[in-house]
Image: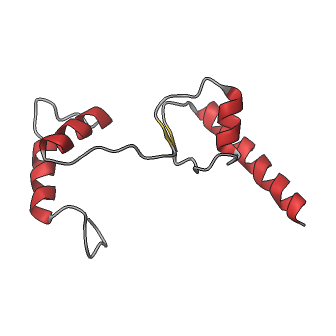
Amino acid sequence: MVGTLNPPVPANAERAFLKEFMQDPDSDWCDVRFGCVAQDHGLELTYLDGTYGWPLENASLEESIVERKTNVSPLVFQYIDKEHMQRIHKERAGATSKRTRTAT
């Protein structure tokens, strides 16, 4: 891993993983393929809080996540379109400005 003095995976394991990951017939880059190859190489998959793989159908849940009313900061919203991302950005900007006005 670039810039890491103590990488979590040895260099030879990293090379073996990448070699298999890039081989046909299934060399499409996707999260499912990554997970399968990682497990083939002995890595354990774990959940990462703050990642949202599907659009949130519940508007109040999304608002509480975006405004950081939950204990976990949002890291990734996947499968959303440009307009949805812009709405999330506006919601976050509005929440930040509310906190700034309240703090002063």
Taking the image as shown, residue 95 lies to the left or right of residue 32, namely: right
Quarter of the image holding residue 100?
A: bottom right
Residue 81 position (above or below residue 35) = above
Q: The C terminus lies in which quarter of the figure?
A: bottom right
Taking the image as shown, residue 56 lies to the left or right of residue 37, namely: right
Quarter of the image holding residue 45?
A: top left
| Camera-side residue of 44 and 96 | 44
Question: Would residue 87 be seen by someone viewing this image from the given angle?
Answer: no
> What colour scheme has been applied to the protein in the rendered image?
secondary structure
Residue that extends furthest to the bottom in the rendered view of this protein: 5
Q: The N terminus lies in which quarter of the figure?
A: bottom left
Residue 7 position (above or below residue 86) = below
Name the residue located 57 percent from the left edge and 49 percent from the top edge.
72
Image coordinates of residue 43 in percent, x first then y, are 20, 48
Image coordinates of residue 40 in percent, x first then y, are 13, 41
| Camera-side residue of 89 and 95 | 95
Q: How many marks?
A: 0
Image coordinates of residue 26 in percent, x first then y, are 15, 31
Name the residue located 24 percent from the left edge and 46 percent from the top edge.
44
Taking the image as shown, residue 77 lies to the left or right of residue 27, namely: right
| Camera-side residue of 87 and 10 | 10
Residue 92 position (above or below residue 78) = below
Question: Would residue 55 be seen by someone viewing this image from the given angle?
Answer: yes
Residue 100 position (above or below residue 62) = below
Taking the image as shown, residue 69 lies to the left or right of residue 21, namely: right
Name the residue located 28 percent from the left edge and 33 percent from the top edge.
32
Residue that extends furthest to the front in the rendered view of this protein: 71
Image coordinates of residue 65 in percent, x first then y, are 64, 41
